[in-house]
Image (cartoon, rainbow, N blue to C red):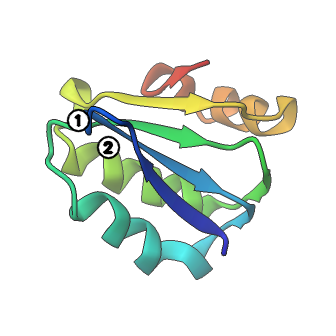
Amino acid sequence: MPLTKTKSPDSKSVTLSIDGMFDLSIQQDFRKAYESEEKTTNFIIDMGKTEYMDSAAFGMLLVFRDYLGGDKASVVVRNASADIKNSFEILQFDRMFDFE
């Protein structure tokens, strides 16, 4: 499955792990994964197994961030490859998301 969702033991954070392609094909699953949680939840996007992101994925991240409150949103991108992190930097998304 390209998207898995894992809650922390204290249920205060949710990790969304993306395996393979982060593109339009997972849009519905991605949206369902975060819309089923409280807006105050801290989210982690684990990209340790993400091989590729297209422009639709960046659009999904913008909608996701706006849904959570924009600048007030707590979203961390974890384990992104150098290429993916470079894409975030080129698009200046590194200013909107924290990286680990």
Tell me which numbered mark, 1 or 2, is placed earlier along the sequence.
2
Q: Left of 92 or right of it: where is 43?
A: left
Q: Quadrant of the C terminus?
A: top right
Give 57 or 75, whichever is nearer the viewer: 75
Examine the image and state in which quarter residue 37 appears. Answer: bottom left
Seen in the picture, residue 76 relative to 51 is either above or below; the reply is: above
Q: Are marks 1 and 2 in contact (CB under 8 Å)?
A: yes
Mark 1, residue position = 70
Going by the numbered disc 1, the residue's amino acid type is Gly
* Crowding near the residue tagged with mark 2, few <14, some 14–19, many ≥20 C-alpha atoms within 10 Å: some
Task: For residue 46, say whether it is visible.
Answer: yes
Give 30 or 72, whichever is nearer the viewer: 30
Taking the view exactly as shown, the residue that stands out farthest to the front is 9
Q: Left of 42 or right of it: where is 72?
A: left
x and y percentages locating residue 94 in the rendered image: 56, 24
x and y percentages locating residue 1 in the rendered image: 66, 75
x and y percentages locating residue 73 in the rendered image: 25, 31
For residue 65, which numbered disc appears in the image? 2
Q: Secondary structure at mark 2?
A: helix
Distance (Cα) linking label 1 and label 2: 5 Å
Give 10 or 36, whichever is nearer the viewer: 10
Residue at 71% across, 31% down: 79
Residue at 33% across, 52% down: 64
x and y percentages locating residue 18 in the rendered image: 64, 57
Residue at 61% across, 41% down: 46
